[in-house]
Image (tube, rainbow, N blue to C red):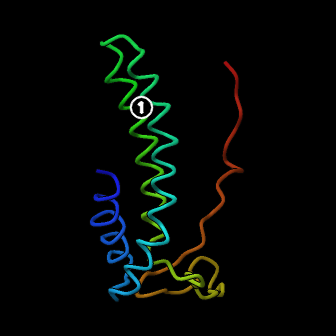
Amino acid sequence: WCPLVFSSFEIPVSTILNGETSPSKIQNEVNSKLGGLLVSNAKVWTLANVIIYNASVEWRPVIANVVDVLWQSIVSDVAADCGKVVDDVCEVGELDDVDGDRIGSLGGLEVTKEKDYSFFAEKSRI
């Protein structure tokens, strides 16, 4: 089931959600990500299944859920990279200190300097 789910849902949907809508680029993402994802799947779940099915019945769901959380973090990392542009950079402009507290506005939001109140803190031991 893994190749079918990964190639028809997981990778294409993640690529589209990350902003790429060209069918040829979606197919390129599937081709480039599918092999590595299947190898990772085999590495994680082969060992996990050996451990799960050698554990007692009451511990199997717990072990399977722990491994599934690990596996979903791997899949989400691959999904986050689908359709990613190499030079994808979030640029935020420099804001100058205008009047001490207010630095400026960015996209309609007021940006202020965070005041340092650490000199008010006193260390005490009881």
Q: Residue at x 27, y 65 (%)?
A: 9
Residue sitting nearer the eye, 18 or 104: 18
Percent x, y of residue 119 = 72, 50
Q: Residue at x 43, y 54 (%)?
A: 75
Secondary element at tag 1: helix
> Given the image, on which type of amino acid does mark 1 rest?
Val
Left/right placement of residue 65 relative to residue 100 reads left
Q: Residue at x 49, y 71 (%)?
A: 32
Percent x, y of residue 42 = 47, 44
Residue sitting nearer the eye, 60 or 113: 60
Percent x, y of residue 66 = 41, 31
Can you say whether 115 is above or below 53 in the image? Answer: below
The residue carrying mark 1 is 66
Can you say whether 112 is above or below 67 in the image? Answer: below
Residue 80, by quadrant, is bottom left
Q: How many labels, in total?
A: 1
Residue sitting nearer the eye, 45 or 86: 45
Q: Residue at x 37, y 29 (%)?
A: 64
Name the quadrant of the C terminus: top right
**Dot 1 crowding, Cα within 10 Å, few <14, some 14–19, many 20+:** few
Percent x, y of residue 28 = 44, 79
